[in-house]
Image (tube, rainbow, N blue to C red):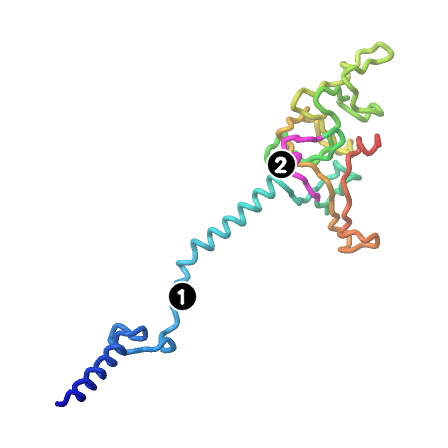
């Protein structure tokens, strides 16, 4: 065999070796191009469960924090807050900034845990702040709260008719006194039971868009004491 023939055979063998060991080759030694490769396999569904569970857990945690610390939209029932809130069909917007009595004022409409039933929440109006002397039944007088220095001009001792609201507590009543169970029944309420302040309400009995341009009868729930003074 001539030198030229040996050299040609060597080059041919080298090319075969490149085809079997290059990027397109598989483990069997048969060459494959990029287009011949099978598509990548997707991970099995079970392997994606931890990631999905983590996402759901984050969403639930965010909703819980928002509901307990920021804002709540909840239904109210009963006649105790008429005419401010309807006996049925009203949903109130509750700001959790005022949770535990933070920055509340007399006249605020608040949501609180019922002192004699921790499983129930009620909506009432603050009619006495710490240090105030409050008439047990506000329907007996035009004003239901008097400052600490109040004295009866007739010389009678008003303390026989009034109760002093202790520190860290408030006195609450319903706007519809004859149909309200409130501090007249369960006495003063610890501020720690206040879960938020009612700032607005929607009436689900109203049309979606009424003649006044309000959505579902949206209205603000104000502070009766501050608004009256102003």
Q: Identify whether 7 is placed above or below 176.
A: below
> Disc 1 versus disc 2: distance between alpha carbons?
50 Å
For marks 1 and 2, the one nearer the N-term is: 1
| Side of 74 where 137 appears, left or right | right
Disc on res. 73: none
- Residue at 70% of width from left, 42% of height from top? 77
Q: How many marks?
A: 2
Crowd class of label 2 (few under 14; some 14 to 19; many from 20; radius 10 Å):
few
Crowd class of label 1 (few under 14; some 14 to 19; many from 20; radius 10 Å):
few
| Side of 98 where 87 appears, left or right | right
Which contiguous range is marked in magenta?
A: 92-104
Q: Identify whether 2 is placed above or below 186.
A: below
Check disc 2 and report its element: helix, strand or loop.
strand
Q: Which is in the foreground here, disc 1 or disc 2?
A: 1
Membership of 96 in magenta stretch? yes
Q: Mark 1 and 2 residues: CB-CB less than 8 Å, in contact?
A: no
Percent of width and height locating residue 115: 63, 29
Q: Identify whether 217 is placed above or below 168.
A: below
Q: Quadrant of residue 88?
A: top right
- Residue at 73% of width from left, 35% of height from top? 109
Task: Give the residue furthest to the left.
Answer: 1
Disc on res. 120: 2
Membership of 164 in magenta stretch? no
Percent of width and height locating residue 200: 74, 43
Task: Give the residue furthest to the front.
Answer: 3
Q: Quadrant of residue 178?
A: top right
Q: Identify whether 39 is placed above or below 132.
A: below
Q: Quadrant of residue 117?
A: top right
Disc on res. 42: 1
Percent of width and height locating residue 196: 66, 36
- Residue at 38% of width from left, 69% of height from top? 40
Check disc 1 and report its element: helix, strand or loop.
loop
């Amino acid at each position: 065999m001539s030198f030229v023939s040996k050299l040609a055979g060597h080059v041919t063998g080298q090319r075969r070796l490149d085809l079997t060991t290059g990027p397109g080759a598989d483990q069997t030694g048969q060459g494959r191009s990029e287009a011949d490769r099978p598509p990548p396999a997707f991970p099995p569904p079970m392997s994606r469960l931890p990631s999905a569970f983590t996402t759901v857990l984050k969403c639930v945690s965010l909703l819980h924090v928002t509901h307990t610390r920021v804002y709540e939209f909840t239904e109210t029932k009963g006649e105790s807050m008429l005419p401010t809130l309807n006996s049925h069909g009203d949903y109130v917007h509750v700001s959790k900034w005022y949770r535990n009595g933070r920055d509340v004022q007399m006249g605020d409409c608040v949501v609180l845990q019922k002192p004699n039933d921790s499983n129930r929440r009620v909506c009432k109006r603050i009619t006495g702040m710490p240090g105030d002397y409050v008439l047990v039944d506000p329907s007996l007088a035009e004003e239901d709260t008097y400052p600490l220095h109040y004295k009866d001009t007739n010389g009678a001792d008003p303390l026989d008719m009034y109760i002093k609201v202790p520190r860290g507590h408030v006195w609450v009543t319903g706007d519809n006194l004859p149909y309200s169970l409130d501090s007249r029944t369960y006495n003063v309420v610890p501020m720690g039971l206040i879960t938020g302040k009612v700032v607005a309400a929607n009436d689900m009995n109203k049309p979606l868009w009424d003649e006044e341009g309000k959505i579902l009868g949206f209205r603000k729930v104000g502070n009766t004491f501050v608004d009256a003074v102003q």
